[in-house]
Image: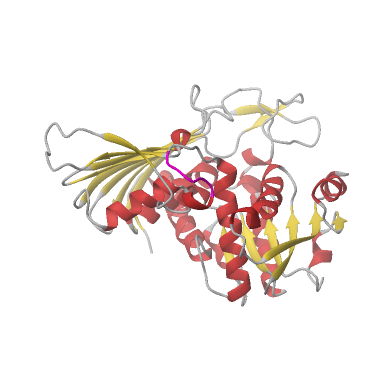
Amino acid sequence: MSSVGIAVVGFGWMGRVHAQAYARVRHHYPAAPRPVLIAVADDVPGRAVEALAQFGFTTATDDWRTLLDDPRVDAVSITAPNFLHREMGAAFAAAGKHIWIEKPVGLSADDARAIVGDVQVSVGFNYRNAPAVEKARALLAAGEIGDVTHARFRFFSDYAAHPEGALSWRFERARGGNGVLGDLGSHAVDLVRHLLGEIDRLVTDTAIFVPQRPRPSGVTAGHQRGAGPAGPVENEDYLGSLLRMASGARVVLEASRVAVGEQNSYGFEIHGTRGALFWDFRRMGELGIGAGGSYQDEPVRTVFVGPHDGEFGVFQPGAGIPMGYDDLKVIEAYRFLCSAADGVPRGATLTDAIRSAEALDAMSRSAETGGWVTLP
């Protein structure tokens, strides 16, 4: 296909990010299939119509099901809340529509497995697209730090730290699933797998630190304050997990949505027999490398990624010029459009989502039993 008809289902913040990414794709990838914004669906009154006017969609609807048989739609971005992923994903896959779906793809591994069809499915694990992460992956594959011995992955945020934050769907078990596990933990697990391979066994502890929140007074958007009576928080604020990798490496993985003083503090420290790698999302274009062969007292140098690292070169001409979060979604959009056009999977796929969800399900079981759980 030289062009791909696009529908976006769910137009909160992430739906907007997807629409913006489609608009920018051919600025950075001139040979990419051309995305044509056909339809936007959202059941919040007025939201779809506003998106139509701002982004140039042809059709706005409050019922996503009307798009299943729309011959103009070749592919769909599913950016609705987690509890809708299974129904929407399965329906669009059965209708033959290619899917770009946000993580964690439902509430469990079974939800992700339910998306079955002869279509391409790309998943929004955007942090693996950072050029510094791709550089780290290349260095690991080349053995630059030797065999990985142990690592630490952290995903800390304060978006739910305020005790008056509204009790939105994110805090309900039936609609938000396993809380911070699916929200930030899924990203962390994907980065672990992307860089270090498969997880063999794990043991996990979880906690709810803000047990009650005020109910929202209306439709919630983002992380706003509540004004209604208090209700219980049903899913996890924090997870801490020890992972044993198939390679034999050990990993500490932590995620928190209530970490006061931490704003999007995502990153990793990876240690090997001959060196180490360090990355912080907030300094996305920098990678710390300690790999000089000194072992003891090894200095760590910070390098700026450049045009030959990952997809950096299609955004900036020289090292040290920052990229941003939205650029990572442009990379995803490009890979998704190419996959939809030629049938070749690129980037994070449904298989990655299933493997991540299996790890998250295992973490939940471990937290319940207090014991180690072996992954499939």
Q: Main secondary structure of the magenta part?
A: loop
Chain part drawn in magenta: 315-319
Q: Nearer the viewer, residue 310 or 366?
A: 310
Query: In what quadrant of the picture does the N terminus appear?
Result: bottom right
Q: Nearer the viewer, residue 353 or 33?
A: 33
The count of marks equals 0
To which quarter of the image does residue 100 belong? bottom right
Compared across the picture, whether 143 is left or right of 29 comes to left
Q: Residue 102 at x, y = what percent?
A: 61, 53
Q: Residue at x 59, y 63 (%)?
A: 336
In the image, is residue 373 above or below residue 230? below
Residue 317: in magenta span: yes
Q: Residue at x 11, y 34 (%)?
A: 296
Q: Residue at x 37, y 60 (%)?
A: 375
To which quarter of the image does residue 66 belong? bottom right
Coloring scheme of the render?
secondary structure
Say if residue 91 shows up in the picture: no
Q: Residue 74 at x, y = what percent?
A: 72, 70
Q: From this viewpoint, which residue is outermost toward the front?
A: 317
Compared across the picture, whether 101 is left or right of 193 comes to right
Q: From this viewpoint, which residue is outermost toward the bottom?
A: 118
Q: Residue 138 at x, y = what percent?
A: 32, 55
Say if residue 272 shows up in the picture: yes
Q: Residue 361 at x, y = what percent?
A: 47, 54
Query: In what quadrant of the picture does the C terminus appear?
Result: bottom left
In the image, is residue 179 above or below residue 123? above
Compared across the picture, whether 276 is left or right of 24 comes to left
Residue 226: in magenta span: no
